[in-house]
C-alpha cells in the first residue's frame, strides 16, 4: 500500500502578511480555490492501492488541518501533532512508526515485515502544475521503493537557480537513476554549469520509500534521532483524531532534515526526474511565477485596478488596491497589514517578519480574523476598555464552557439561532435578540441549527486579552492555556 505522508509544519514567513504562524501558507488557497494542503492530498488521488494520508503538523494548526481534510473528502488515518519543530527527519520517522502500527505490524524493528507500507513524503506547500506528470513520476519510482530503495524526486531545472540544493544523478537507469551526490545551494556560475550539464536536478524535498527502509537507514546514520522518535511514539496519546507526542521527549530529539540525516549518507538513494511545473512557493515572486499572468506580466487577485503597471503581483483581500506606474512590485493587502516590496527584494520579507516579532507585534502570528475549531472571530473595533468582535459559529458547533475574570460581554445575534448558557440558565436567542454576560459568570455559545450563527460581541473591562479565560468543559479537548 502507498501511504501519503503530508508534512504540514512550516510557517511560511516569506509569504507574510497572508501567511502567519497560526495560519501558514499551506492552509491558504494561493493557487486556486483549494488550499495548498488540499491540493497536495488531491494530487495523489487515483494512484493504485492508495491508503489514507498521515499528516504531521504543528499542534496549533490541528483543527484547521482536520477541517480542511474533511472538507476535501480525504480524512487522514492519523494527524500527528509536533509539540516543537524538529525538521523533516524526525517528522517522517514518527509518521513511519504510525504507518507501521496502522498496517498491523507488531514489531516495527523487524527485518522481515509482515506489512511494510510505501510512504510518499510530500510537503504540504508545493505547487505542481502538471499533476499527471507527477503521478507518472510516482509510478516510475514506486517499484524501486518497493524493493527497498530510498527514492527522491529531482526537479528538471528550467533555469540556473541559486536558491535550491541540487542532486547529481549517477550512471545507469532510464526513469530511475542512482544518486551520485547531493550538493548545497550553488553560486550563479556553478548553477549555470549544473543546468548545462543535464546531470543535475533541483532537490524537491519529496521522497518515497518503505517505512522500514527509512527507519533502518535513519538508525544506521542518525541513531539518536531514531531513538528519540521511538521514545516519543511509545509515549504518544490519542486525543480526538490526533496523535500527540510527549513534548519533553520529542523536544530532546536532534533537529535535522531527511537530506542531511539520511539521503546524503545512504547507499540506497535513487532519483526520479520530475518535469511537472514544480515550485516550492518560497517567496512572493515564486508565487507570481507559478500563476498565469496577463499580457503585461501581472498577476492580480481580489479588487485591483491598475494603470501603466507591469511585472507586478497585487493581492487584495478586503480593500481596493489602485496602482499607477508600478514596475516589478509586490503589493499584498490584508485586514490589518499591507506589504509593498520590489520583486527583487521579496526574500527580505523574512527579515521584516523577524523585526516585527522582535517588536512584539501580533501581526506575525495571527490575522485579525482568528480561526477556532468552532468557527472564527474577527476583532472589528477596539479602544480603551472595550473591544467589538464578530463571532461566526459553525452549525452544530459549541464554544467551551468558560468564564472571564476581567471582562463582561454583551452578545447580539445577527443571524441564526444561539443556545446560550449563562450561569445556571440555558436559553435560545434568535435574530436581533441579545444578552449580557457579567464578569465572572460561566457561559457558553452553541449553534443548534443547520445554518451558520453570526453574533456581535461587545467586550468591556480592564483587560481584554485572549488569555483571560478559564475553561470548564470543551468538546475539542482544549485547556485554559490553549487557543
Image (cartoon, rainbow, N blue to C red):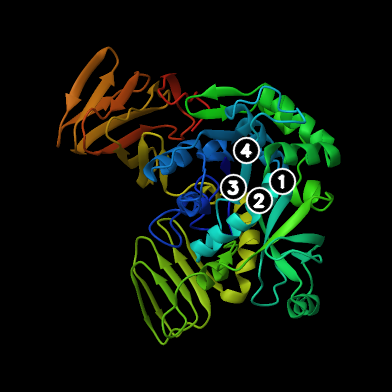
Q: Which mark is residue 147?
A: 1
Q: Residues within 10 Å of mark 1 (few under 14, many from 20)?
A: few
Contact, CB < 8 Å: mark 1 with mark 3? no
Contact, CB < 8 Å: mark 3 with mark 4? no
Labels 1 and 3: the sequence-earlier one? 1
Residue 110 visible within the image: yes
Q: Quadrant of residue 211?
A: top right
Labels 2 and 3: the sequence-earlier one? 2
Contact, CB < 8 Å: mark 1 with mark 2? yes
**Where residue 312 sits in the image (x, y, percent)?**
48, 77
Labels 4 and 2: the sequence-earlier one? 4
- Residue highlighted by disc 2: 143
**Where residue 234 sits in the image (x, y, percent)?**
68, 22
Labels 1 and 4: the sequence-earlier one? 4
Q: Residues within 10 Å of mark 3 (few under 14, many from 20)?
A: few
- Residue highlighted by disc 4: 117
Depth check, mark 1 against mark 3: the one in front is: 1
Q: Residues within 10 Å of mark 2 (few under 14, many from 20)?
A: some
**Where residue 64 sits in the image (x, y, percent)?**
45, 41
Q: CA distance from mark 1 to mark 3?
A: 51 Å
Secondary structure state at the residue bearing disc 3: loop
User: In screen coordinates, is 474 left or right of 311?
Assistant: left
Residue closest to the eye, 247 or 89: 89
Amino acid at each position: 500500500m502507498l501511504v501519503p505522508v503530508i508534512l504540514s509544519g512550516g510557517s511560511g514567513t516569506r509569504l507574510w502578511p497572508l501567511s502567519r504562524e497560526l495560519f501558514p501558507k499551506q492552509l491558504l488557497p494561493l493557487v486556486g480555490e483549494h488550499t495548498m494542503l488540499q491540493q497536495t492530498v488531491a494530487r495523489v488521488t487515483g494512484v493504485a492501492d492508495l491508503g489514507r494520508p498521515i499528516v504531521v503538523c504543528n499542534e496549533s494548526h490541528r483543527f484547521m488541518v482536520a477541517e480542511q481534510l474533511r472538507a476535501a473528502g480525504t480524512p487522514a488515518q492519523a494527524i500527528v501533532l509536533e509539540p516543537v519543530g524538529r525538521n523533516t527527519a524526525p517528522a517522517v520517522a514518527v509518521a513511519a512508526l504510525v504507518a507501521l502500527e496502522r498496517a498491523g505490524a507488531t514489531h516495527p524493528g523487524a527485518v522481515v515485515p509482515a506489512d511494510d507500507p510505501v510512504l510518499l513524503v510530500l510537503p504540504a506547500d508545493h505547487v505542481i502544475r502538471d499533476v499527471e506528470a507527477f503521478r507518472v513520476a510516482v509510478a516510475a519510482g514506486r517499484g524501486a521503493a518497493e524493493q527497498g530503495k530510498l527514492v527522491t524526486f529531482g526537479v528538471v531545472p528550467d533555469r540556473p537557480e541559486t536558491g535550491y540544493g541540487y542532486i547529481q544523478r549517477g550512471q545507469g537507469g532510464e526513469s530511475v537513476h542512482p544518486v551520485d551526490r547531493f550538493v548545497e545551494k550553488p553560486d550563479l556560475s556553478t548553477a549555470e554549469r549544473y543546468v548545462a550539464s543535464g546531470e543535475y536536478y533541483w532537490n524537491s524535498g519529496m521522497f518515497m520509500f518503505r517505512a522500514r527502509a527509512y527507519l533502518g537507514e535513519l538508525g544506521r546514520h542518525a541513531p539518536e534521532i531514531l531513538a528519540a522518535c521511538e521514545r516519543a511514539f511509545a509515549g504518544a496519546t490519542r486525543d480526538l483524531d490526533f496523535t500527540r507526542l510527549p513534548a519533553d521527549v520529542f523536544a530532546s530529539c536532534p533537529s535535522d532534515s531527511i537530506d542531511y540525516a539520511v539521503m546524503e549518507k545512504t547507499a540506497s538513494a535513487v532519483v526520479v526526474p520530475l518535469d511537472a511545473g514544480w515550485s516550492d512557493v518560497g517567496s512572493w515572486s515564486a508565487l507570481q511565477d507559478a500563476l498565469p499572468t496577463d499580457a503585461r506580466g501581472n498577476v492580480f487577485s481580489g479588487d485591483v485596478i491598475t494603470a501603466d503597471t507591469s511585472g507586478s503581483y497585487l493581492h487584495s483581500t478586503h480593500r481596493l488596491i489602485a496602482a499607477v506606474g508600478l514596475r516589478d512590485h509586490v503589493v499584498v493587502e490584508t485586514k490589518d497589514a499591507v506589504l509593498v516590496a520590489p520583486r527583487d527584494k521579496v526574500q527580505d520579507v523574512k527579515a521584516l517578519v523577524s523585526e516585527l516579532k522582535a517588536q512584539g507585534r501580533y501581526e506575525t502570528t495571527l490575522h485579525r480574523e482568528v480561526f477556532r475549531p468552532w468557527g472564527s472571530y474577527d476583532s472589528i473595533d477596539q479602544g480603551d476598555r472595550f473591544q467589538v468582535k464578530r463571532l461566526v459559529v459553525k452549525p452544530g458547533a459549541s464554544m467551551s464552557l468558560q468564564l472571564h475574570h476581567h471582562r463582561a460581554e454583551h452578545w447580539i445575534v445577527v443571524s441564526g439561532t444561539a443556545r446560550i448558557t449563562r450561569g445556571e440558565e440555558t436559553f435560545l436567542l434568535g435574530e436581533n435578540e441579545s444578552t449580557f454576560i457579567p464578569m465572572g459568570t460561566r457561559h457558553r455559545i452553541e449553534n443548534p441549527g443547520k445554518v451558520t450563527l453570526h453574533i456581535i460581541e461587545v467586550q468591556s473591562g480592564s483587560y481584554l486579552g485572549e488569555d483571560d479565560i478559564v475553561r470548564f468543559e470543551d468538546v475539542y479537548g482544549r485547556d485554559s492555556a490553549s487557543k
